[in-house]
């Protein structure tokens, strides 16, 4: 029955989100979080994969102004590199000579080189006024499942960095 399936799907779309990765353009982050806010709880963890200074302050002001209801934040930076370069291989040279008058082949062949990158993640953000070390430790512990799941995705090549490096990398 399609209606029963729709109700089941609608129920799934209302369940709390335990872990969320946001890797969209910074200007869309607040809008996305406003749509999901009702599903994010204080024990949820959001990994922001952006390098924009002031983003968290904007999210706190417009989406989660009450620190006691705010999810845990992690900041991630994704690094990889690509390089385009002109390359003429023997095969392409032979093809070009064979089809010299053809409009289907470009005069030059362009290749892209991609070097594997990694996802660098900083510690849980300290953004709660008057938070004790014990309270911070509990919040940090609630992110362990999320981080272990990310470590399981070996293709992401996860690296964890400390607070100082996290600040340095975001500038």
Image (cartoon, grey):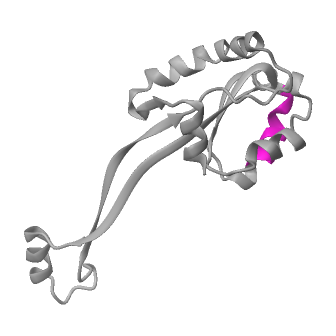
As for residue 99 lying within the magenta part, the answer is: no
Left-right relation of 51 to 59:
left
Is residue 1 among the parts visible in the rendering? Answer: no
User: From the viewer's perspective, is 99 left or right of 82?
Assistant: left
Our reading of the magenta stretch's main secondary structure is helix
The part of the image, by quadrant, that contains residue 13 is top right
Q: Could you tell me residue 11's position as x and y percent?
A: 81, 20
Q: Residue at x 88, y 22 (%)?
A: 68
Q: Is residue 66 visible?
A: yes
Q: Residue furthest bottom?
A: 101
Report the front residue among 151 and 56.
56
Above or below 78: residue 144:
above
Residue at (69% x, 51% y) in the render: 53
Q: Quadrant of residue 166?
A: top right
**Count of marks placed on residues:** 0
Q: Is residue 61 left or right of residue 107?
A: right
Report the quarter where the N terminus lies.
top right
**Farthest right residue in view:** 66
Q: Does the magenta segment cover residue 37?
A: yes
Q: What residue is rendered at 66% in x and 26% in y?
A: 124
**Where residue 127 appears, x then y in whole percent?**
78, 30
> Is 22 located above or below residue 145 in the figure?
below
Region of the chain picked out in magenta, as a range: 29-38
Q: Which residue is located at x 91 percent, y 35 percent?
A: 65
Relative to 41, 78 lies left or right:
left
Question: For residue 93, which quarter of the picture?
Answer: bottom left
In the displayed structure, would residue 115 be above or below residue 43?
below
**How far across and how far down the image is residue 32, in percent?**
77, 43
């Amino acid at each position: 029955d399609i209606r029963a399936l729709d109700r089941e799907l609608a129920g799934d779309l209302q369940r709390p989100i335990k872990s969320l990765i946001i890797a969209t353009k910074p200007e869309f982050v607040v809008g996305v979080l406003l749509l999901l806010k009702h599903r994010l709880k204080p024990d949820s963890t959001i990994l922001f994969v952006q390098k924009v200074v002031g983003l968290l302050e904007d999210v706190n002001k417009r989406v989660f102004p009450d620190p006691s209801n705010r999810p845990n934040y992690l900041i991630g930076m994704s690094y990889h590199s690509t390089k385009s370069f002109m390359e003429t291989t023997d095969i392409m040279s032979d093809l070009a000579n064979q089809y010299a008058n053809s409009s289907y082949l470009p005069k030059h062949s362009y290749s892209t080189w991609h070097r594997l990158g990694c996802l660098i993640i900083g510690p849980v953000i300290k953004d709660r006024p008057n938070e004790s070390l014990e309270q911070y430790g509990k919040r940090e512990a609630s992110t362990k499942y999320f981080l272990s799941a990310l470590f399981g995705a070996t293709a992401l090549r996860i690296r964890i960095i400390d607070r100082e490096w996290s600040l340095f990398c975001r500038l």
